[in-house]
Amino acid sequence: MNKTLKLIGREKELFLDDIQKHENKLSDIVSNSSFLVIGGAGSIGQAVTKEIFKRHPKKLHVVDISENNMVELVRDIRSSFGYINGDFQTFALDVGSVEYDAFIKADGKYDYVLNLSALKHVRSEKDPFTLMRMCDVNIFNTDKTLAQSIENGVKKYFCVSTDKAANPVNMMGASKRIMEMFVMRKSKQINVSMARFANVAFSDGSLLHGFNQRLEKNQPIVAPNDIKRYFVTPQESGELCLMSCIFGENRDIFFPKLSEDLHLITFADIAVKYLKEKGYEPYLCRDEDEARELSKTLPAEGKWPCLFTASDTTGEKDFEEFFTDKETLDMNRFENLGIIKNEAIFDEELLNEFRDKISSMKTNREWTKEQIVELFFKMIPDFGHKETGKYLDGKM
Protein backbone atom coordinates (compact mmCIF):
# COMPACT_ATOMS: atom_id res chain seq x y z
CA MET A 1 0.00 0.00 0.00
CA ASN A 2 1.11 3.56 -0.78
CA LYS A 3 2.95 4.90 2.32
CA THR A 4 1.27 8.33 2.15
CA LEU A 5 -2.16 6.66 2.11
CA LYS A 6 -1.27 4.77 5.26
CA LEU A 7 -0.15 7.94 7.06
CA ILE A 8 -3.42 9.74 6.31
CA GLY A 9 -5.34 6.71 7.58
CA ARG A 10 -6.63 5.37 4.24
CA GLU A 11 -6.32 2.08 2.43
CA LYS A 12 -7.70 2.83 -1.01
CA GLU A 13 -6.74 5.28 -3.76
CA LEU A 14 -9.68 7.63 -4.19
CA PHE A 15 -10.04 7.88 -7.96
CA LEU A 16 -8.78 4.45 -9.01
CA ASP A 17 -12.18 3.28 -10.37
CA ASP A 18 -12.79 6.49 -12.31
CA ILE A 19 -9.29 6.55 -13.81
CA GLN A 20 -9.44 2.88 -14.86
CA LYS A 21 -12.88 3.29 -16.36
CA HIS A 22 -11.89 6.31 -18.46
CA GLU A 23 -8.20 5.49 -19.05
CA ASN A 24 -8.49 4.67 -22.76
CA LYS A 25 -10.25 7.91 -23.60
CA LEU A 26 -7.96 9.90 -21.29
CA SER A 27 -4.78 8.48 -22.85
CA ASP A 28 -6.16 8.94 -26.34
CA ILE A 29 -6.95 12.64 -25.79
CA VAL A 30 -3.66 13.39 -23.97
CA SER A 31 -1.51 11.66 -26.58
CA ASN A 32 -3.10 13.74 -29.34
CA SER A 33 -2.93 17.09 -27.52
CA SER A 34 -0.57 19.87 -26.48
CA PHE A 35 -0.40 21.24 -22.94
CA LEU A 36 0.89 24.24 -21.04
CA VAL A 37 1.18 23.76 -17.27
CA ILE A 38 1.57 27.02 -15.32
CA GLY A 39 2.92 26.63 -11.78
CA GLY A 40 4.05 23.17 -12.79
CA ALA A 41 6.85 22.79 -10.23
CA GLY A 42 4.68 23.12 -7.12
CA SER A 43 3.38 19.95 -5.49
CA ILE A 44 0.10 19.83 -7.42
CA GLY A 45 1.78 21.13 -10.57
CA GLN A 46 4.38 18.35 -10.48
CA ALA A 47 1.66 15.74 -9.93
CA VAL A 48 -0.37 17.06 -12.88
CA THR A 49 2.72 17.29 -15.11
CA LYS A 50 3.55 13.63 -14.37
CA GLU A 51 -0.04 12.52 -15.11
CA ILE A 52 0.17 14.24 -18.51
CA PHE A 53 3.76 13.15 -19.28
CA LYS A 54 3.12 9.44 -18.68
CA ARG A 55 0.31 9.52 -21.28
CA HIS A 56 2.71 10.76 -24.01
CA PRO A 57 1.41 14.21 -25.04
CA LYS A 58 2.41 15.79 -28.36
CA LYS A 59 3.66 18.87 -26.54
CA LEU A 60 4.11 19.59 -22.83
CA HIS A 61 5.53 22.94 -21.72
CA VAL A 62 5.91 23.67 -18.02
CA VAL A 63 6.32 27.14 -16.54
CA ASP A 64 7.20 27.92 -12.92
CA ILE A 65 8.91 30.71 -10.99
CA SER A 66 10.98 28.21 -8.97
CA GLU A 67 14.09 27.19 -10.89
CA ASN A 68 15.12 24.67 -8.21
CA ASN A 69 11.77 22.88 -8.07
CA MET A 70 11.77 22.71 -11.86
CA VAL A 71 15.15 20.94 -11.84
CA GLU A 72 13.76 18.41 -9.36
CA LEU A 73 10.65 17.90 -11.52
CA VAL A 74 12.79 17.04 -14.56
CA ARG A 75 15.05 14.72 -12.54
CA ASP A 76 11.99 13.02 -11.07
CA ILE A 77 10.35 12.55 -14.49
CA ARG A 78 13.55 11.27 -16.12
CA SER A 79 14.15 8.87 -13.22
CA SER A 80 10.61 7.46 -13.16
CA PHE A 81 9.15 7.72 -16.69
CA GLY A 82 12.16 8.39 -18.93
CA TYR A 83 11.43 10.15 -22.22
CA ILE A 84 8.64 10.82 -24.70
CA ASN A 85 8.65 11.57 -28.43
CA GLY A 86 6.64 14.74 -27.82
CA ASP A 87 8.07 18.22 -27.19
CA PHE A 88 8.76 18.41 -23.43
CA GLN A 89 10.31 21.65 -22.13
CA THR A 90 10.43 23.60 -18.88
CA PHE A 91 10.76 27.37 -18.47
CA ALA A 92 11.70 29.19 -15.24
CA LEU A 93 9.43 32.21 -15.73
CA ASP A 94 7.20 34.45 -13.63
CA VAL A 95 3.72 34.48 -15.17
CA GLY A 96 3.34 38.16 -14.28
CA SER A 97 6.45 39.13 -16.24
CA VAL A 98 7.14 40.57 -19.68
CA GLU A 99 9.36 37.52 -20.42
CA TYR A 100 6.33 35.25 -19.95
CA ASP A 101 4.29 37.43 -22.31
CA ALA A 102 7.08 37.16 -24.91
CA PHE A 103 7.13 33.36 -24.40
CA ILE A 104 3.37 33.18 -25.09
CA LYS A 105 3.71 35.52 -28.08
CA ALA A 106 6.46 33.33 -29.57
CA ASP A 107 4.19 30.26 -29.68
CA GLY A 108 1.22 30.15 -27.32
CA LYS A 109 -0.49 27.37 -29.27
CA TYR A 110 -1.85 24.78 -26.85
CA ASP A 111 -4.98 22.67 -26.70
CA TYR A 112 -5.07 22.78 -22.91
CA VAL A 113 -3.73 25.35 -20.46
CA LEU A 114 -3.64 24.28 -16.79
CA ASN A 115 -2.95 26.97 -14.22
CA LEU A 116 -1.78 25.56 -10.88
CA SER A 117 0.10 28.58 -9.57
CA ALA A 118 -1.20 29.98 -6.29
CA LEU A 119 -0.32 31.63 -3.03
CA LYS A 120 -1.95 29.03 -0.84
CA HIS A 121 -0.90 29.81 2.71
CA VAL A 122 -3.21 31.48 5.20
CA ARG A 123 -0.01 32.95 6.67
CA SER A 124 0.52 34.92 3.43
CA GLU A 125 -2.35 37.26 4.30
CA LYS A 126 -0.83 38.72 7.46
CA ASP A 127 0.78 41.78 5.81
CA PRO A 128 -0.58 44.09 3.07
CA PHE A 129 2.28 43.43 0.63
CA THR A 130 2.15 39.63 0.48
CA LEU A 131 -1.64 39.92 0.47
CA MET A 132 -1.46 42.08 -2.65
CA ARG A 133 0.80 39.48 -4.27
CA MET A 134 -1.85 36.88 -3.38
CA CYS A 135 -4.43 38.97 -5.28
CA ASP A 136 -2.03 39.17 -8.22
CA VAL A 137 -1.15 35.49 -8.38
CA ASN A 138 -4.54 34.01 -7.50
CA ILE A 139 -6.82 36.46 -9.34
CA PHE A 140 -5.13 38.71 -11.90
CA ASN A 141 -2.58 36.24 -13.31
CA THR A 142 -5.49 33.84 -13.84
CA ASP A 143 -7.46 36.53 -15.66
CA LYS A 144 -4.41 37.46 -17.75
CA THR A 145 -3.55 33.87 -18.77
CA LEU A 146 -7.23 33.29 -19.58
CA ALA A 147 -7.20 36.32 -21.92
CA GLN A 148 -4.01 35.01 -23.61
CA SER A 149 -5.61 31.57 -23.98
CA ILE A 150 -8.69 33.09 -25.66
CA GLU A 151 -6.45 35.07 -28.01
CA ASN A 152 -4.49 31.94 -28.98
CA GLY A 153 -7.54 29.75 -29.57
CA VAL A 154 -6.86 27.38 -26.66
CA LYS A 155 -9.50 24.63 -26.47
CA LYS A 156 -9.78 24.48 -22.69
CA TYR A 157 -8.49 26.39 -19.66
CA PHE A 158 -8.27 24.70 -16.26
CA CYS A 159 -7.36 26.24 -12.91
CA VAL A 160 -7.36 25.09 -9.31
CA SER A 161 -9.68 26.67 -6.82
CA THR A 162 -9.80 25.46 -3.20
CA ASP A 163 -12.25 23.93 -0.74
CA LYS A 164 -11.66 27.17 1.19
CA ALA A 165 -13.54 29.10 -1.56
CA ALA A 166 -16.81 27.52 -0.38
CA ASN A 167 -18.06 29.94 2.30
CA PRO A 168 -14.55 31.44 2.76
CA VAL A 169 -13.28 32.56 6.18
CA ASN A 170 -9.76 33.60 5.14
CA MET A 171 -8.34 35.92 2.49
CA MET A 172 -6.73 33.00 0.65
CA GLY A 173 -10.08 31.23 0.24
CA ALA A 174 -11.77 34.52 -0.64
CA SER A 175 -9.13 35.33 -3.28
CA LYS A 176 -9.90 31.99 -4.95
CA ARG A 177 -13.65 32.67 -4.70
CA ILE A 178 -13.09 36.03 -6.46
CA MET A 179 -10.89 34.21 -9.00
CA GLU A 180 -13.85 31.91 -9.73
CA MET A 181 -15.97 35.01 -10.50
CA PHE A 182 -13.37 36.30 -12.98
CA VAL A 183 -13.18 32.82 -14.55
CA MET A 184 -16.98 32.76 -14.95
CA ARG A 185 -16.80 36.04 -16.91
CA LYS A 186 -14.23 34.61 -19.36
CA SER A 187 -16.19 31.34 -19.64
CA LYS A 188 -18.36 33.10 -22.23
CA GLN A 189 -15.34 33.13 -24.55
CA ILE A 190 -13.49 29.88 -23.69
CA ASN A 191 -14.33 26.54 -22.11
CA VAL A 192 -13.12 26.49 -18.49
CA SER A 193 -13.16 23.98 -15.67
CA MET A 194 -11.80 23.97 -12.13
CA ALA A 195 -11.24 21.74 -9.11
CA ARG A 196 -11.75 22.28 -5.41
CA PHE A 197 -10.06 19.82 -3.13
CA ALA A 198 -8.61 19.18 0.26
CA ASN A 199 -5.09 19.38 1.63
CA VAL A 200 -2.49 17.58 -0.44
CA ALA A 201 -0.60 15.35 1.98
CA PHE A 202 3.10 16.26 2.33
CA SER A 203 2.85 19.00 -0.32
CA ASP A 204 5.58 21.64 -0.41
CA GLY A 205 5.36 24.02 2.53
CA SER A 206 2.52 22.13 4.22
CA LEU A 207 2.58 21.14 7.87
CA LEU A 208 3.07 17.47 6.94
CA HIS A 209 5.96 18.37 4.63
CA GLY A 210 7.35 20.22 7.65
CA PHE A 211 7.41 16.93 9.60
CA ASN A 212 10.10 15.67 7.21
CA GLN A 213 12.12 18.86 7.74
CA ARG A 214 11.77 18.70 11.54
CA LEU A 215 13.08 15.13 11.66
CA GLU A 216 15.95 15.98 9.36
CA LYS A 217 16.88 18.96 11.56
CA ASN A 218 16.28 17.21 14.88
CA GLN A 219 13.51 19.60 15.88
CA PRO A 220 10.20 19.04 17.70
CA ILE A 221 7.00 18.22 15.82
CA VAL A 222 4.19 20.70 16.41
CA ALA A 223 0.60 20.17 15.28
CA PRO A 224 -2.92 21.35 16.13
CA ASN A 225 -4.97 18.65 17.84
CA ASP A 226 -8.38 20.23 17.23
CA ILE A 227 -8.38 20.74 13.45
CA LYS A 228 -9.58 17.86 11.29
CA ARG A 229 -8.85 17.86 7.59
CA TYR A 230 -9.42 15.76 4.49
CA PHE A 231 -6.25 14.76 2.66
CA VAL A 232 -5.55 13.62 -0.86
CA THR A 233 -2.20 12.22 -2.01
CA PRO A 234 -0.13 14.19 -4.55
CA GLN A 235 -0.99 11.64 -7.26
CA GLU A 236 -4.71 11.98 -6.49
CA SER A 237 -4.43 15.76 -6.80
CA GLY A 238 -2.88 15.31 -10.26
CA GLU A 239 -5.59 12.84 -11.32
CA LEU A 240 -8.39 15.11 -10.13
CA CYS A 241 -7.00 18.11 -12.05
CA LEU A 242 -6.46 16.14 -15.26
CA MET A 243 -9.95 14.57 -15.10
CA SER A 244 -11.52 18.01 -14.66
CA CYS A 245 -9.39 19.50 -17.43
CA ILE A 246 -10.16 16.76 -19.97
CA PHE A 247 -13.72 15.73 -19.03
CA GLY A 248 -15.13 18.83 -17.36
CA GLU A 249 -17.83 20.68 -19.28
CA ASN A 250 -17.71 24.48 -19.43
CA ARG A 251 -17.76 26.01 -15.91
CA ASP A 252 -17.67 22.62 -14.11
CA ILE A 253 -15.86 22.46 -10.77
CA PHE A 254 -14.73 18.93 -9.82
CA PHE A 255 -14.26 17.83 -6.20
CA PRO A 256 -13.62 14.54 -4.35
CA LYS A 257 -16.83 12.93 -3.09
CA LEU A 258 -16.93 12.53 0.65
CA SER A 259 -17.21 8.85 1.46
CA GLU A 260 -15.69 6.35 3.86
CA ASP A 261 -12.71 6.37 1.47
CA LEU A 262 -11.99 10.02 2.29
CA HIS A 263 -12.15 10.62 5.99
CA LEU A 264 -11.30 13.41 8.38
CA ILE A 265 -8.14 13.15 10.45
CA THR A 266 -6.37 15.58 12.79
CA PHE A 267 -2.83 16.79 12.14
CA ALA A 268 -1.84 15.41 15.57
CA ASP A 269 -3.12 11.94 14.60
CA ILE A 270 -1.06 12.03 11.41
CA ALA A 271 1.99 13.15 13.41
CA VAL A 272 1.64 10.08 15.66
CA LYS A 273 1.31 7.71 12.66
CA TYR A 274 4.20 9.47 10.94
CA LEU A 275 6.55 9.12 13.94
CA LYS A 276 5.65 5.46 14.43
CA GLU A 277 6.38 4.83 10.74
CA LYS A 278 9.81 6.40 11.33
CA GLY A 279 10.38 4.24 14.43
CA TYR A 280 9.73 6.86 17.15
CA GLU A 281 7.35 7.04 20.08
CA PRO A 282 5.71 10.51 20.36
CA TYR A 283 6.48 12.30 23.65
CA LEU A 284 4.00 15.04 24.55
CA CYS A 285 5.57 18.29 25.83
CA ARG A 286 4.06 21.11 27.90
CA ASP A 287 5.35 24.06 25.86
CA GLU A 288 7.76 25.16 23.12
CA ASP A 289 10.73 25.53 25.50
CA GLU A 290 10.45 21.98 26.81
CA ALA A 291 10.00 20.63 23.27
CA ARG A 292 13.09 22.45 21.98
CA GLU A 293 15.16 21.31 24.97
CA LEU A 294 14.10 17.65 24.75
CA SER A 295 14.83 17.46 21.01
CA LYS A 296 18.52 17.35 21.98
CA THR A 297 18.19 14.13 23.98
CA LEU A 298 14.94 12.22 23.33
CA PRO A 299 15.52 11.01 19.74
CA ALA A 300 18.47 8.90 20.90
CA GLU A 301 16.01 7.08 23.20
CA GLY A 302 13.61 6.36 20.33
CA LYS A 303 11.18 9.11 21.39
CA TRP A 304 10.28 12.37 19.64
CA PRO A 305 9.20 15.60 21.37
CA CYS A 306 5.74 16.75 20.23
CA LEU A 307 3.65 19.79 21.02
CA PHE A 308 -0.03 19.31 20.21
CA THR A 309 -2.18 22.36 20.92
CA ALA A 310 -5.51 23.94 20.00
CA SER A 311 -5.52 26.36 17.06
CA ASP A 312 -6.15 30.08 17.59
CA THR A 313 -4.73 31.71 14.45
CA THR A 314 -6.55 33.89 11.93
CA GLY A 315 -8.24 32.21 8.97
CA GLU A 316 -8.44 28.63 10.23
CA LYS A 317 -11.72 27.07 9.18
CA ASP A 318 -13.40 24.79 11.70
CA PHE A 319 -14.49 22.34 9.02
CA GLU A 320 -14.04 21.72 5.32
CA GLU A 321 -16.63 21.81 2.56
CA PHE A 322 -16.27 21.50 -1.18
CA PHE A 323 -19.55 23.15 -2.14
CA THR A 324 -22.29 25.33 -0.65
CA ASP A 325 -26.00 24.57 -0.38
CA LYS A 326 -26.64 27.12 -3.16
CA GLU A 327 -24.63 25.16 -5.74
CA THR A 328 -26.04 22.59 -8.19
CA LEU A 329 -24.32 19.19 -8.10
CA ASP A 330 -23.90 16.24 -10.44
CA MET A 331 -23.04 13.27 -8.24
CA ASN A 332 -23.77 10.56 -10.83
CA ARG A 333 -21.31 11.03 -13.68
CA PHE A 334 -18.31 9.63 -11.80
CA GLU A 335 -17.80 7.16 -8.99
CA ASN A 336 -15.68 9.30 -6.63
CA LEU A 337 -15.73 12.69 -8.31
CA GLY A 338 -18.54 15.15 -7.69
CA ILE A 339 -19.20 18.08 -10.04
CA ILE A 340 -20.54 21.54 -9.29
CA LYS A 341 -22.52 22.75 -12.32
CA ASN A 342 -22.34 26.51 -12.84
CA GLU A 343 -24.10 29.17 -14.86
CA ALA A 344 -22.03 32.15 -16.02
CA ILE A 345 -23.08 34.31 -13.09
CA PHE A 346 -20.96 37.36 -12.31
CA ASP A 347 -21.39 41.09 -11.70
CA GLU A 348 -19.52 42.89 -14.48
CA GLU A 349 -19.54 46.24 -12.67
CA LEU A 350 -18.25 44.74 -9.42
CA LEU A 351 -15.41 42.88 -11.17
CA ASN A 352 -14.31 46.04 -12.98
CA GLU A 353 -14.47 48.09 -9.78
CA PHE A 354 -12.35 45.49 -7.95
CA ARG A 355 -9.77 45.45 -10.77
CA ASP A 356 -9.62 49.28 -11.00
CA LYS A 357 -9.30 49.88 -7.25
CA ILE A 358 -6.50 47.31 -6.90
CA SER A 359 -4.81 48.75 -9.97
CA SER A 360 -4.88 52.29 -8.55
CA MET A 361 -3.44 51.08 -5.19
CA LYS A 362 -0.57 49.47 -7.11
CA THR A 363 0.02 52.57 -9.22
CA ASN A 364 0.29 54.68 -6.04
CA ARG A 365 2.51 52.02 -4.41
CA GLU A 366 0.44 52.44 -1.26
CA TRP A 367 -2.35 50.45 0.40
CA THR A 368 -3.37 48.90 3.72
CA LYS A 369 -4.56 45.44 4.57
CA GLU A 370 -7.87 47.00 5.71
CA GLN A 371 -8.48 48.47 2.24
CA ILE A 372 -8.03 45.08 0.58
CA VAL A 373 -10.20 43.35 3.20
CA GLU A 374 -12.92 45.97 2.57
CA LEU A 375 -12.79 45.25 -1.18
CA PHE A 376 -13.07 41.52 -0.49
CA PHE A 377 -16.16 42.11 1.66
CA LYS A 378 -17.71 44.09 -1.20
CA MET A 379 -17.10 41.18 -3.57
CA ILE A 380 -18.30 38.55 -1.05
CA PRO A 381 -20.91 40.16 1.24
CA ASP A 382 -21.22 37.06 3.48
CA PHE A 383 -17.42 36.65 3.77
CA GLY A 384 -16.76 35.10 7.21
CA HIS A 385 -13.32 36.67 7.80
CA LYS A 386 -12.39 37.14 11.47
CA GLU A 387 -9.13 38.75 12.54
CA THR A 388 -7.69 37.18 15.71
CA GLY A 389 -4.39 39.08 15.47
CA LYS A 390 -2.53 35.75 15.72
CA TYR A 391 -0.67 34.18 12.80
CA LEU A 392 1.18 30.95 12.19
CA ASP A 393 4.49 32.81 11.85
CA GLY A 394 4.15 33.73 15.51
CA LYS A 395 4.56 30.12 16.65
CA MET A 396 6.92 27.19 16.24
Image (cartoon, grey):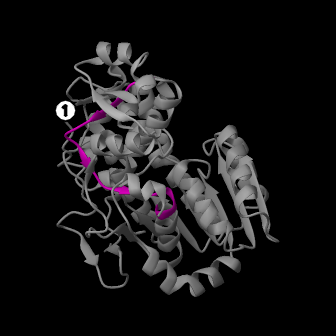
Q: Which structural element holds mark 1?
A: loop
Quadrant of the image occupied by residue 131 = top left
How many marks on residues?
1
- Residue displayed at 35% across by 75% down: 336
Considering only vertical position in the picture, is 145 above or below 278? Answer: below
Q: Give the residues in magenta.
A: 219-236
Magenta segment includes 320: no
**Quarter in which the C terminus is drawn:** top left
Check disc 1 and give the amino acid type. Answer: Ala
Q: Where residue 198 appears, x then y in whole percent?
A: 35, 55
| Left or right: where 349 falls relative to 104 | left
Q: Is residue 111 above or below residue 10?
A: below
Q: Is residue 307 left or right of residue 355?
A: left
Position of 206 relative to 41 (above/below) = above
Q: Is residue 116 visible?
A: no
* Residue furthest out toward the front: 301
Q: Position of residue 59 (x, y in %)?
A: 74, 68
**Relative side of 30 to 182, left or right:** right
**Which residue position is annotated with label 1?**
310
Which residue occupies the foreground of this view, 169 or 198? 198
Residue 231 horizontal/vertical position (percent):
36, 55
Q: Position of residue 313 (x, y in %)?
A: 24, 30
* Nearest the eye: 285 or 310: 285
Pick whichever, 310 or 161, lies toward us: 310
Res 115 → quadrant: bottom right
Q: Quadrant of residue 68?
A: top right
The answer to whether residue 188 is seen in the rendering is yes
Q: Residue at x 41, y 25 (%)?
A: 301
Q: In the image, is residue 233 part of the stretch drawn in magenta? A: yes
